[in-house]
Image (cartoon, helix red, strand yellow):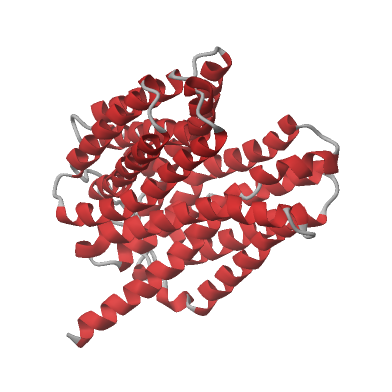
Amino acid sequence: MATVVRSMGREVRVLSLVSTGHFMSHYSQLILPPLFIMMAPHFGVGFAAMGLIMTLLNMSGALAQIPVGFLVDRVGAKWILIIGLFMKTFGLGAMAFTDTYWVLLVLAVFAGLGHSVFHPTDYAILMSSVDEKRIGRAFSIHTAAGNAGTLMAPLVAAFFLTTQWGWKGAIFSVAILGAVAGIAMLAQSGTLQDHAGRKKGKPKEGVSVSDGLRMLIQPQMLILYMFFCITAMATVGLNNFIHAGLVTAHGIDEISAAAALSAYAGGGLIGVLLGGWLADKASNHNKQAALAFFIGAVLTILAGVYSLPHAALIIMFGLIGVMLGVVKPARDMMVKEITPEGQAGKTYGFMSNGHFVGAAISPVLMGIVMDAGKPSWVFFIAAGFMVISILTLLNPPKAKTTETRSN
């Protein structure tokens, strides 16, 4: 009994540290866009130039995901996570101390490289630290922490924009929170272990780069890559255009539309935690994801077709958020089920790259639909992506077919 308690206590510490880093990654990612309205005139540029900052940040993060995953599987996740956290903290925090636009672009690339470490390292650590019986809930808490960071960032940005500290104070908050999280990880670094760390003192084993790439292009990996990509197209598209879509398509007032967006985000948090519990109980995670997506697609279509009373609309988008949240732990478990031992870094890095790709495509597509005067199609397209995601699950990946070979 005492051994079990000690083991669970260590799991809680590991999960707390990793989730804090994930919160920080999302918080720092989303604090910039609300500040553009004050940053643009300060730097003497337009909103397109401000948008380029986020483009470079996301592109550098996406491109680095897979190489970082290979590095995690070779040398271990702990120090890569800590270094990446400090890189992103410095990259964004330093933006508060420059008055030169091109420096912002350089810092954005640097911060994006730091951002790239979180998924490959976090999942490698969690899979090596948490008991199989609780891993679904661990995944869900990790994801929920990131969602909490997403929710917190606009609120903090709004607070600073109404005070004397302004946009620089809001950005500097990233440096403060990031430094606190990094110091906590350094202090508890002995708690963080992963599959590479456990091999210390043994001959180095693993797959070569070419073998690793062949592993990633196996059918079961590509199916889940498509699932991550298409899922992101649905969820990120809704994140960006629920508000504008409701106001334009149904004449909803902006406050009610914002309330629907908040309900969607809050429902997502609840759904992620519920999905983690279900993932630990279920043996067929693709069915969990497919059922949740089906319900979410039906509700999203209804939101596009009908102009509902405001209270009903808020409840509906809360339920859509719950359904899309339920998918995420099931998705992570499906990846775990096909990840060969010792390959979590590159596998989750590959899947995260798919998420970045989908997240880059969807807002542009939704924006084109809005500009064409078809705002209801925002909801129809998002529902369509959910249905396509279900189709990728009809023949779910099952086997861990890759064997490790010595270099």
Does the rendering let one see residue 262? yes
Q: How many marks?
A: 0
Percent of width and height locating residue 407: 38, 53
Residue at image point 65% right, 38% down: 56
Q: Residue 168: which quarter of the image?
A: bottom right
Residue 283 position (above or below residue 309)? below
Percent of width and height locating residue 250: 47, 22
Percent of width and height locating residue 243: 52, 33
Frontmost residue, 387 versus 160: 160
Residue extending farthest left: 283
Q: Residue 152: which quarter of the image?
A: bottom right
Residue at image point 27% right, 78% down: 7
Q: Residue 175: which quarter of the image?
A: bottom right
Residue at image point 55% right, 22% down: 367
Percent of width and height locating residue 365: 51, 21
Residue 376 position (above or below residue 58)? above
Frontmost residue, 267 versus 386: 267
Residue extending farthest top: 372
Residue extending farthest bottom: 2
Residue at image point 25% right, 45% down: 334
Q: Is residue 173 shown left or right of residue 271?
A: right
Does the rendering let one see residue 357? no
Frontmost residue, 251 versus 141: 251
Q: Is residue 395 shown left or right of residue 212?
A: left
Q: Is residue 20 shown left or right of residue 292?
A: right
Residue 198 position (above or below residue 22)? below
Q: Quadrant of the N terminus?
A: bottom left
